[in-house]
Amino acid sequence: MRVAVTGGGGFLGSHLCEALLRRGDAVVCLDNLSTGQSENIAHLREYPEFEFIHADVSVTAEVPGAVDAVAHLASPASPPDYLRLPLQTLAVGSRGTENALELARRNQARFLLASTSEVYGDPLVHPQEEEYWGNVNPVGPRSVYDEAKRYAEAVSLAYRRSHGVDVGIIRIFNTYGPRMRPHDGRVVSSFITQALGGEPLTIYGDGKQTRSFCYVSDLIRGLMAMLDSSETGPINLGNPDEWTVSELAQLVLEITGSDSEIQYHPLPTDDPVRRRPVIARAQEHLGWSPEVPVADGVHRTVEWFRSQPHDNGQPATVAAPTL
Ligand code: NAD
Ligand code: UDP
């Protein structure tokens, strides 16, 4: 297959590009590197079947030649990123998704949408199955991400109904692993960076809120299974192992051996209280289940952060390789 991956320079996108290349597919990565990093994909230049197009897909998602599939991952994903880039987040969820859908329509290609557990908002139903319609504040600060993704799901299904595009929607729950930016503000990368740097771990609120953490290799296996299937979804992908934020902080302290203190900060507006996926659909329709226990995944992620040229958690001033 020749697969166009929007957001392929990001955390998940770069792992998806790599997995596709490894199995022999050709990959065209489209990214504006707004929250991605050229380091994530520099090593992929070794593959002759890898192409990079520097593009804002909210403006254009043109790819010369035929493609068999479009995986649309472009979007800020970390809360501090989408709160810092509210209009860009709305644009890429709406116009960016439309442009990526047009690319799929013109090529009669499979279209994979990377949606999110945030479409459930601060859920009133627990755990979350795909039938749940969600509890999203349409005017709160998180709405720029949540509503953009809800629109992305709606327009994808409209393209399926109106133009017959072979659409598949995945709702990704919190995923972590190597290639997260050390200061992207998400909880796993933040705690690891803080613990390794001897800085206090910043818990927002009382730390009793929960998330369910999926290791990146498991998630990518699920995305590939969805890409290769003809399922429409939506299908949840995530690890149902649910942790409080305080438990995660303790785990990171144990694994790193750090004696960092815990520091409490105000809870961000509309921060969801509980989140855990029901994954029966993924198990039944994709034959997918997560395999990496959270402690193992955090251990691997800590080792990766340790191997990076950071100075006390601050990114080293190394020149980014040019593509
Ligand atoms: P990321 O920020 O590391 O990657 C997003 C990539 O999209 C970056 O490389 C960024 O530069 C690119 N991008 C953003 N706007 C763009 C635009 N207008 N044009 C071209 N490129 C653009 O985030 P991630 O964690 O890798 O997330 C990837 C996708 O998965 C996102 O769509 C996100 O909403 C979704 N998702 C991720 C998680 C998670 O836990 N990681 C959870 C739910 C959903
Ligand atoms: N969180 C925290 N400290 C941090 C970063 C995040 O306590 O330094 C909390 C955050 O308030 C949320 C949870 O960890 O309750 C997960 O946050 P993240 O930004 O990783 O993902 P999301 O909120 O999108 O699930």
Image (tube, rainbow, N blue to C red):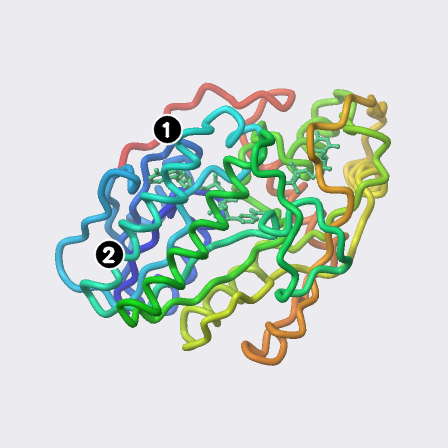
Rendered residue at 38%/59% (across/down): 156
For image coordinates 62% across by 65% down, the residue present is 130
Rendered image quadrant of residue 313: top right
Q: CA distance from mark 2 to mark 1?
A: 32 Å
Q: Which mark is residue 320?
A: 1
Q: Mark 2 = which residue?
A: 102
Q: Is residue 190 left or right of residue 171?
A: right
Q: Evaluate whether residue 24 shows in this view.
A: no
**Residue 99 appears anywhere in the view:** yes
Image coordinates of residue 323 in percent, x first then y, are 26, 37
Mark earlier in primary sequence (2, 1): 2
Is 293 displayed left or right of 313 in the figure? right
Q: Which mark is residue 13?
A: none
Among all residues in the image, which is located at the extreme left?
Answer: 65
Percent position (x, y) of residue 142? 58, 34
Q: Position of residue 310 (x, y in %)?
A: 57, 25
Instruction: Respond yes or no on whether mark 1 lies under 8 Å from ligand 1.
Output: no
**Closest to the observer, 216 or 276:** 276
Q: Is residue 130 above or below residue 182?
A: below
Label 2 crowd bin: few (<14), some (14–19), many (20+), radius 10 Å: some
As rendered, which of 163 and 54 lies closer to the eye?
Answer: 163
Residue at point 65%, 61% (across, down): 132
Q: Amino acid at mark 1?
A: Ala
On screen, 272 above or below 103? above
Q: Which part of the image, by quadrant, shows the N terminus?
A: bottom left
- For this view, does 75 lie left or right of residue 180? left
